[in-house]
Image (spheres, rainbow, N blue to C red):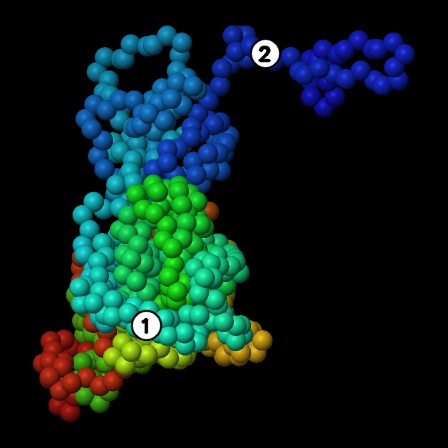
């Protein structure tokens, strides 16, 4: 009797005499794999083996189920494409699995290595096949199969060169450069080097001497019995309560452990490392009054890759108490930390690298948590990323100029005499580098005497972004090397004073200004996109369609750019005035909102990656349709990167663009790396001078370079 809704045969229990309950069906009869009517399936098409710890660290989780011919729900292809790690070549004649864990899983699932198939992003992916019960003799002339760089998935395609998976040693380079903390000269680039380049960190002997003298001041004041905020009194509105000497150690522990208000997703590892190095440098300034043992333990965590788990949200910018306490908890043996790809309790994480928790001395708990680690640490990383974004906006604008056949008189060096602004001339100089060798330098190449303002004012808008970035960098680096603690130890006078140096309103306003500048650049990028799609302005078919029709062209992409521009406008709103709370019983009635400003700048940067990719796609299509001549040294490389992911639009029904792949290539820095091979790399963040005027020597150099090109759209008194 067939089962309801199924068709499979079931055995039924015999009815129980005198029972009103119907008999329950037994489990369906299972066909054995030896039955001829049931073919043995390819297990690899349904279940992926468990990834190793290194693979999970690099590529994320590798578990998932895939139906034959369907999409891979594990997300492995996308994760592999996002990985920036270079694949290392496999050993010649390597057979078997890359580690013992996968070998055991292969034996359990009766799998053997199959042919290597092409993966996403140029990476190789193994193909598992069911292993027969008897080993087969290899065919004559066959070659050994090498295993690939990440957990396998089923795919088809040509066989690429064999590769081997990246290991943890590839994530953390074995050779690290050294950053020495002095408390007075830490730069944004050095913070990035520690956070992302895994640089080792030490502290100078001079700074350690200041730290010891500052701690002596704290011990003398504590012994005198004088009431000092946070040293022997409560915090916030509880400052009026004195802490007995026998309870100071317990009070210090509770000050860190009681901070439980942070929430949200854990911050990335690079942000946590940036927070730790900025706090260590602030302690080296010696205004905190902590012991050298506490600073050394913080540096040991950095150098031994122990990364506390820190939640993203919880600070109003007057000292990131909740987030910094997540770091402090690990130092005292509680909380959680990531070590070698595993998240462990704080005490276990310390023990795994040979460290022990520290017992906090008076004032050290406040010195740990009363710091702007999120604002300064994450802000340093965001500024470094924005410096890349500025250059990529220049690249997309330059390619749009070639697709539009724009007028290059807008970057004439002679204009610097009358507009000697640093940002403007930096933007114009970079555009000249990117367009060097372009057909636009030829006489008569420009279609218009004057282009729309989104093209003509691009150097001005991008110059304002250069100036805003330089101002934010100088403001942030000044705060990185300042004593921002309260109370503050004045070593020279031997006193401890109450101040409000933890306020970072200046840094918050700098990031607010930076977001406004980015939003303006996004806005003119959107306008350039719309002009390229509009045949009245571009002189090309409407929506850049090869064949005119109701569904052809790139018109939907123009709508996407308009939507992103509206969102950028929302993210650009200043947040330095958003605080209206009355916390600590009205005592803390002002806040800078620095972490929120930095987080919104990060979100705006991620959005800008996408609109840059969209402008590049549309500009490349316009270049192909116009077919005017050679591209510039930098724009030609950008065009190559676009065509790696997005082919020329000829027929919408057969067009398969990898837009997300291009967005990820932009965000991962692949675009900038390729452009640098032709037009040089972008300027370092430290090379961005603040807003101001060019010196006379720089103006003289620009006058000399003005004669190197003939600029369309210019007129001379001689008529030349």
Residue 316 visible in this rendered orientation of the protein: no
Question: Residue 419, position in %: x, y?
Answer: 24, 87
At horizontal 42% and vertical 28% (from top left) the residue drawn is: 49
Q: Can residue 123 be seen by looking at this rendering? A: yes
- Vertical comparison of 33 with 291: above or below: above
User: In the visual, does 450 lie left or right of 516?
Assistant: left
Answer few, some or many: residues within 10 Å of disc 2's Cα (few below 14, many 20 plus, some between 14 and 19).
few
For label 2, the SS is loop
Circle 2 is placed at which residue position? 31
x then y, percent, for residue 363: 39, 67
Distance (Cα) linking label 1 and label 2: 83 Å
* Residue 562 at x, y percent in the picture: 48, 67
Q: Residue 542 or 33: which is nearer the viewer? A: 33
Q: For this rendering, which residue is in front, 259 or 218?
A: 218
Tell which residue pokes out farthest to the bottom in this image.
717
Task: State which quadrant residue 5 falls in.
Answer: top right
Q: Is residue 175 above or below residue 138?
A: below
In percent of the image, x 18 and y 59: which residue is there?
A: 678
Residue at (26, 67) in percent of width and height: 211
Q: Which residue is mark 1?
A: 220
Determine the secondary structure under disc 1: helix
Task: Say which quadrant the N terminus sits in.
Answer: top right
Residue 503 location, quadrant: bottom left
Q: Is residue 417 above or below residue 510?
A: below
Q: Measured from the top left, where is residue 630 in percent x and y?
A: 20, 61
Q: Is residue 456 left or right of residue 42?
A: left
Q: How many marks?
A: 2
**Is 531 situated left or right of 482 in this image?**
right
N-terminal-most mark, 1 or 2: 2
User: Quick one: label 1, few (<14), some, or many (20+) residues within 10 Å?
Assistant: few
What residue appears at the point 74 percent right and 21 percent down from the top-left corner?
4
Q: Name the quarter where the C terminus is drawn.
A: bottom left
């Amino acid at each position: 009797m067939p089962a309801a809704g199924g068709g499979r045969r079931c055995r039924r229990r015999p009815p129980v005499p005198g029972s009103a309950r119907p008999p329950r069906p037994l489990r369906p009869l299972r066909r054995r794999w030896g039955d001829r009517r049931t073919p043995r399936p390819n297990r690899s098409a349904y279940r992926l083996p468990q990834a190793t710890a290194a693979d999970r660290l690099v590529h994320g989780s590798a578990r998932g189920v895939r139906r034959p011919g369907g999409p891979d729900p594990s997300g492995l292809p996308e994760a592999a494409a996002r990985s920036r790690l270079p694949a290392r070549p496999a050993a010649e004649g390597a057979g078997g699995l890359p580690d013992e864990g996968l070998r055991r899983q292969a034996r359990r699932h009766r799998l053997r290595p199959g042919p290597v198939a092409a993966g996403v992003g140029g990476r190789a992916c193994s193909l598992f096949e069911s292993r027969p019960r008897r080993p087969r003799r290899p065919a004559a002339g066959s070659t050994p199969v090498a295993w690939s760089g990440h957990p396998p998935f089923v795919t088809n395609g040509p066989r690429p060169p064999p590769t081997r998976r990246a290991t943890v040693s590839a994530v953390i380079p074995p050779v690290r450069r050294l950053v020495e903390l002095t408390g007075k000269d830490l730069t944004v680039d050095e913070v990035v080097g520690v956070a992302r380049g895994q640089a080792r960190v030490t502290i100078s002997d001079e700074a350690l001497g200041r730290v010891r003298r500052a701690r002596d001041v704290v011990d003398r004041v504590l012994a005198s019995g004088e009431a000092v905020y946070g040293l022997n009194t409560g915090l916030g509105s509880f400052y009026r309560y004195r802490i007995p000497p026998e309870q100071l150690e317990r009070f210090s522990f509770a000050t860190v452990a009681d901070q439980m208000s942070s929430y949200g997703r854990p911050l990335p590892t690079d942000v946590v490392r940036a927070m730790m190095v900025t706090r260590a440098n602030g302690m080296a300034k010696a205004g905190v009054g902590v012991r050298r043992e506490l600073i050394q333990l913080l540096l040991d965590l950095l150098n031994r890759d122990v990364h506390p788990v820190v939640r993203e949200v919880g600070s109003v910018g007057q000292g990131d108490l909740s987030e910094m306490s997540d770091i402090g908890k690990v130092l005292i043996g509680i909380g959680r930390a990531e070590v070698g790809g595993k998240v462990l309790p704080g005490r276990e994480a310390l023990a795994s690298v040979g460290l022990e928790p520290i017992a906090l001395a008076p004032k050290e708990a406040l010195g740990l948590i009363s710091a702007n680690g999120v604002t300064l640490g994450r802000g340093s990383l965001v500024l470094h990323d924005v410096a890349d974004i500025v250059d990529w906006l220049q690249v997309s604008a330059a390619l749009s100029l070639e697709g539009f056949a724009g007028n290059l008189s807008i970057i004439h060096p002679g204009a610097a005499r009358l507009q000697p602004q640093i940002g403007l001339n930096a933007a114009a100089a970079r555009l000249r580098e990117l367009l060097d060798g372009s057909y636009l330098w030829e006489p008569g190449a420009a279609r218009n005497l004057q282009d729309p303002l989104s093209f003509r004012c691009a150097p001005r808008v991008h110059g304002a972004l250069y100036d805003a970035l330089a101002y934010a960098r100088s403001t942030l680096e000044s705060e990185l090397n300042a004593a921002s603690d309260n109370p503050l130890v004045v070593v020279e006078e031997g006193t401890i004073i109450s101040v409000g140096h933890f306020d970072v309103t200046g840094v918050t306003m700098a990031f607010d200004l930076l977001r406004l500048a980015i939003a303006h650049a996004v806005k003119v990028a959107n306008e350039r996109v719309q002009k390229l799609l509009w045949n009245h302005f571009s002189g090309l078919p409407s929506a850049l369609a090869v064949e005119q029709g109701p569904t052809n062209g790139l018109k939907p992409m123009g709508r996407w750019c308009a939507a992103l521009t509206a969102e950028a406008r929302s993210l650009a709103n200043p947040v330095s005035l958003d605080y209206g709370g009355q916390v600590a019983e009205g005592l803390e009635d002002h806040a800078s909102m620095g972490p929120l400003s930095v987080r919104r700048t990060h979100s705006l940067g991620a959005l800008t990656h996408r609109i840059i990719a969209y402008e590049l796609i549309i500009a490349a299509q316009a270049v192909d349709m116009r077919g005017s001549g050679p591209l510039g040294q930098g724009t030609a490389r950008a065009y190559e990167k676009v065509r790696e992911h997005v082919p020329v639009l000829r027929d919408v029904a057969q067009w398969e663009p990898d837009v997300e792949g291009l967005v990820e290539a932009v965000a991962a820095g692949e675009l900038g790396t390729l452009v640098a091979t032709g037009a040089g790399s972008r300027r370092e963040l430290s090379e961005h001078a603040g807003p101001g005027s060019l010196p006379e020597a720089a103006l003289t150099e620009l006058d000399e370079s003005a004669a190197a090109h003939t600029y369309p759209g210019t007129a001379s008194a001689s008529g030349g």
